[in-house]
Image (tube, helix red, strand yellow):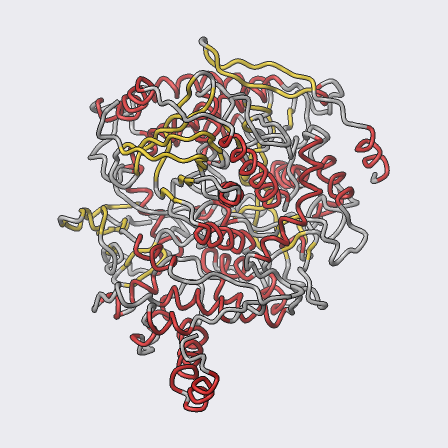
């Protein structure tokens, strides 16, 4: 190993500083171990700040009949029963306590008239369940967690990107990365590593996700030998901005519909009556996204190819109070006053339900010493995530991962770093500098996005998916010829070249899983297999790397215990 | 539509120069889109910080035509056609490269602020009116534009003595938290240098979240400090009770 490498050692290393990473770090610190948090961005900028609508937790402050059983049932139904039932159970049971904890750490939620945390309606939730702060709930959550972590004394490594996990005798013992600022390498030795790196939205051009969402954590885990699960399930949020082009994909919170917003097509028809007459606009995201897509495809779209979403029937002051950032977003970026007229909206790539396969109770991946939480992990949401269940997921499983990682660290010997792995990672990361006049990483990224948008989008079919796999192979080949200009000093072209490899790997996993799953379930819609298949409903797709490349197999889901089955029967 | 010319600083701590880039314009385009176009087609190593591109994370701050702005919320159609648009890094922080500056000082200041501490025995009940008052401060997205324009930092470089508007907003959010039981007047006066602020309101003018930094955060905090340290009645009471140093 190059002796000049800066090295840090922690009991627990958390990769990712969004809601899951910070909550995990806080819990590990509370267990008395040393914790390092690595973040691609500055602290407090993680994608969690963009979460708008709220945190789902059955506090029963507004609808007193709510309890964890109903939340569990809603989550399972929303996920088309492909969810890991144990995760869905833990999530529903523990979410209220996790929200209360945030309040105890200083978060300020909107209030009910009797002084409790206010809750609002959201798609697929039986009761008013989302604890919120106007439409900036994620910001409140991340600031609260950030301040708590700072107060407890975690070490934060900001603007640092991990390029490889390090392993020793079949366990994860740390990671190697580079400082984005100076381009120097840094080695982290750790007894436990927690992956909290979010999703893969940047593989699609129309997305609500930030640049960080390049599937790094999933790709790192996969490269290190951990298993991934069910990556065919990619959520397209029904309402992203569609006009002007520069803002395409920016999220329009589901809270607009939660507060009474109505969807109409160009003929003025309230089209959700056709697709889900019971729940209408508050149907689950997969259904609403497909409905808007279908209306546009059949020629009833708006001028810029979307649907109208209208909240202007509510008093202007109410809209500004409950949806302040939506009001400003449309006013400043699209010249639309949402208190006076409708917004134009259409589906935008938002979330991936699949990810790193974890144990439900302790969030450990199939690679010992490697844990995962939040969007990077799979299981809780099954085939489709309900709005509001992401923030609660981050808190519940972030905490569980932190707890388990600390416990694991206490029972584990000091990590041994394999110099050969560090050298190989350095060589891999610097390769784009060794080549001259090769491919521009930005051009490959644009082409990857085209492939994913046109062939692995909302509606899929065999022919398209097979074509996508061929194109992905070509893109992978082109990637081996990427070259970058300039020095290692804060060089976004170089950063993208490395992030791109993660995107290519995970995109391939998405396309392969999507091709294999011959049914339509939740967010995965096959034109050639439009129905639910009872047989596929009992199986997960498991992805793993072996010497010859990516392999896929199916594994049967474990049987749900009788008491949970009974809850589902009672809450139909 | 005609192309726009962006005149962007390229360089590092050792200096550099502004470079012109010609960028095709699309409807609704913002300055950050133009910077992304430069990265994607003209100069892949142009250093820019950004995350959400939706005005929610506060990463993409820069000085556009001399004005401190979030580049993701600055529309290209607000500029005169044909005139070059200058884009510079924030002046109050050391340049790392191009438009990326070293803002780590802010994270150091933040650590000095005593966190939320609930009043003993609270029942965790409070009302929307109480929430509204502090939620204004909690809207802050830490873009540091207020820090960038504050003349105490920008012109006088008092970083060692003065915390800057961002952190007075943070303290105000804690001090006015309906359930907080701590007082932070001493640290405001002695460590965060609140007295240096002479309420020119430059910070309020640039805040993309429209937080009334001066009127709603800084002035009430100044009043608290004055009440505590300079109100003769309070001073006498304290002398009598012997808790002068609390």
Identify the residue at horizontal 75%, vertical 58% (top origin).
A62
Residue A572 rendering spot, x and y as whole percentages: 83, 38
* Residue A134 in which image quadrant: bottom right
Residue A1 rendering spot, x and y as whole percentages: 26, 22
Residue A368 rendering spot, x and y as whole percentages: 52, 23
Q: Is residue B226 above or below residue A313?
A: below
* Residue B85 in which image quadrant: bottom left
Q: Is residue B118 above or below residue A102?
A: below
Residue situated in front as seen by the camera: A131 or A496: A131
The number of callouts visible is 0
Query: In the displayed image of the protein, which residue is found farthest to the top?
Result: A548
Residue situated in front as seen by the camera: A186 or B115: B115
Identify the residue at horizontal 49%, vertical 36% (top origin).
A196
* Residue A104 in which image quadrant: bottom right
Residue situated in front as seen by the camera: B14 or B232: B232
Left/right placement of residue A512 relative to residue A298 reads left
Q: Is residue A437 visible?
A: yes
Left/right placement of residue A340 relative to residue B174 reads right
Left/right placement of residue A515 relative to residue A180 reads right
Q: Is residue B53 visible?
A: no
Residue A45 rendering spot, x and y as whole percentages: 43, 49
Left/right placement of residue B90 relative to residue A359 reads left
């Amino acid at each position: 190993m190059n002796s000049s490498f800066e090295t840090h050692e922690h009991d627990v290393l958390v990769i990712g500083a969004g809601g899951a990473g910070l909550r995990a770090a806080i819990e590990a610190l509370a267990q008395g171990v040393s914790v390092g948090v690595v973040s691609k961005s500055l602290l407090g900028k993680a994608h969690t700040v963009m979460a708008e609508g709220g945190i789902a937790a059955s506090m029963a402050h507004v609808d007193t009949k709510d309890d964890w059983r109903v939340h569990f049932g809603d989550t399972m139904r929303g996920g088309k029963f492909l969810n890991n039932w144990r995760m869905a159970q833990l999530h529903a049971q523990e979410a209220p306590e996790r929200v209360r904890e945030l309040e105890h750490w200083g978060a300020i939620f909107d209030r009910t008239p009797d002084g409790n945390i206010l809750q609002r309606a959201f798609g697929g939730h039986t009761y008013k369940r989302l604890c919120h702060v106007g439409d900036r709930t994620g910001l409140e959550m991340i600031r609260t967690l950030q301040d708590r972590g700072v107060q407890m004394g975690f070490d934060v490594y900001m603007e640092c990107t991990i390029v490889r996990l390090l392993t020793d005798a079949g366990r994860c013992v740390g990671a190697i990365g580079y400082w984005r600022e100076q381009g120097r390498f840094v080695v982290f030795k750790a007894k436990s590593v927690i992956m909290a790196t979010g999703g893969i939205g940047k593989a699609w051009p129309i997305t609500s996700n930030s640049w960080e969402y390049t599937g790094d954590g999933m790709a790192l885990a996969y490269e290190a030998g951990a298993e991934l699960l069910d990556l065919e399930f990619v959520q397209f949020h029904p309402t992203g901005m569609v006009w002007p082009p520069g803002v395409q994909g920016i999220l329009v919170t589901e809270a607009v519909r939660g507060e009474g917003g109505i969807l109409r097509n160009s003929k003025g028809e309230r089209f959700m009556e056709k697709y889900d007459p019971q729940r209408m606009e508050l149907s689950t995201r997969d259904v609403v996204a497909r409905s808007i897509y279908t209306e546009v495809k059949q020629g009833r779209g708006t001028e810029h190819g979307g649907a109208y979403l209208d909240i202007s029937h509510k008093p202007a002051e109410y809209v500004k109070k409950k949806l302040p950032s939506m009001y400003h977003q449309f006013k400043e970026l699209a010249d639309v006053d949402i208190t006076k007229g409708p917004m134009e909206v259409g589906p935008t790539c938002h979330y991936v339900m699949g990810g790193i396969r974890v144990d439900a109770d302790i969030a450990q991946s199939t690679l010992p010493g490697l844990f995962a939480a939040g969007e990077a992990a799979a299981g809780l949401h099954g085939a489709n995530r309900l709005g509001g269940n992401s923030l609660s997921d981050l808190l519940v499983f972030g905490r569980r991962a932190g707890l388990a990682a600390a416990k694991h660290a206490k029972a584990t010997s000091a990590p041994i770093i394999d110099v050969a792995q560090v050298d190989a990672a350095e060589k891999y990361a610097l390769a784009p500098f060794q080549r001259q006049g090769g491919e521009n990483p930005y051009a490959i990224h644009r082409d990857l996005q085209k492939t994913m948008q046109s062939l692995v989008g909302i509606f899929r079919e065999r022919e398209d998916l097979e074509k996508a796999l061929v194109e992905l192979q070509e893109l992978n080949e082109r990637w081996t010829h990427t070259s970058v200009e300039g020095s290692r000093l804060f060089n976004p072209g170089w950063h993208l070249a490395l992030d791109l490899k993660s995107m290519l790997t995970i995109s391939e996993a998405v396309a392969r899983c999507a091709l294999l799953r011959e049914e339509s379930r939740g967010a995965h819609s096959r034109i050639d297999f439009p129905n639910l298949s009872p047989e596929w409903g009992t199986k997960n797709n498991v992805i793993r790397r072996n010497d010859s490349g990516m392999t896929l197999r199916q594994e049967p889901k474990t049987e749900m215990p009788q008491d949970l089955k009974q809850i589902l029967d009672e809450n139909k | 539509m005609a192309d726009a010319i962006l005149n962007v600083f390229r360089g590092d701590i050792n200096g550099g120069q502004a470079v012109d880039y010609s960028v095709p314009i699309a409807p609704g385009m913002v300055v950050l889109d133009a910077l992304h176009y430069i990265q994607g087609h003209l100069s892949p190593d142009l250093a820019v910080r950004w995350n959400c591109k939706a005005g929610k994370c506060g990463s993409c701050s820069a000085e556009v035509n001399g004005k401190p702005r979030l580049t993701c919320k600055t529309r290209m159609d607000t500029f005169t056609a044909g005139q070059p648009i200058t884009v510079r890094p924030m002046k109050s922080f050391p340049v790392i490269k191009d438009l990326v500056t070293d803002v780590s000082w802010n994270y150091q200041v933040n650590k000095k602020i005593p966190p939320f501490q609930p009043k003993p025995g609270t029942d965790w009940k409070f009302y929307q009116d109480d929430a509204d008052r502090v939620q204004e401060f909690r809207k802050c997205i830490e873009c540091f534009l207020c820090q960038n324009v504050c003349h105490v930092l920008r012109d006088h470089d008092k970083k060692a003595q003065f915390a800057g508007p961002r952190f007075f907003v943070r303290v105000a959010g804690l001090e006015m938290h309906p359930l907080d039981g701590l007082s932070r007047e001493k640290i405001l006066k002695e460590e965060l240098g609140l007295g240096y602020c002479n309420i020119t309101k430059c910070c309020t003018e640039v805040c993309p979240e429209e937080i009334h930094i001066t009127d709603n955060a800084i002035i009430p905090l100044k009043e608290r400090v004055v009440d505590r340290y300079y109100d003769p009645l309070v001073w006498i009471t304290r002398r009598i009770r012997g808790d002068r140093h609390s």
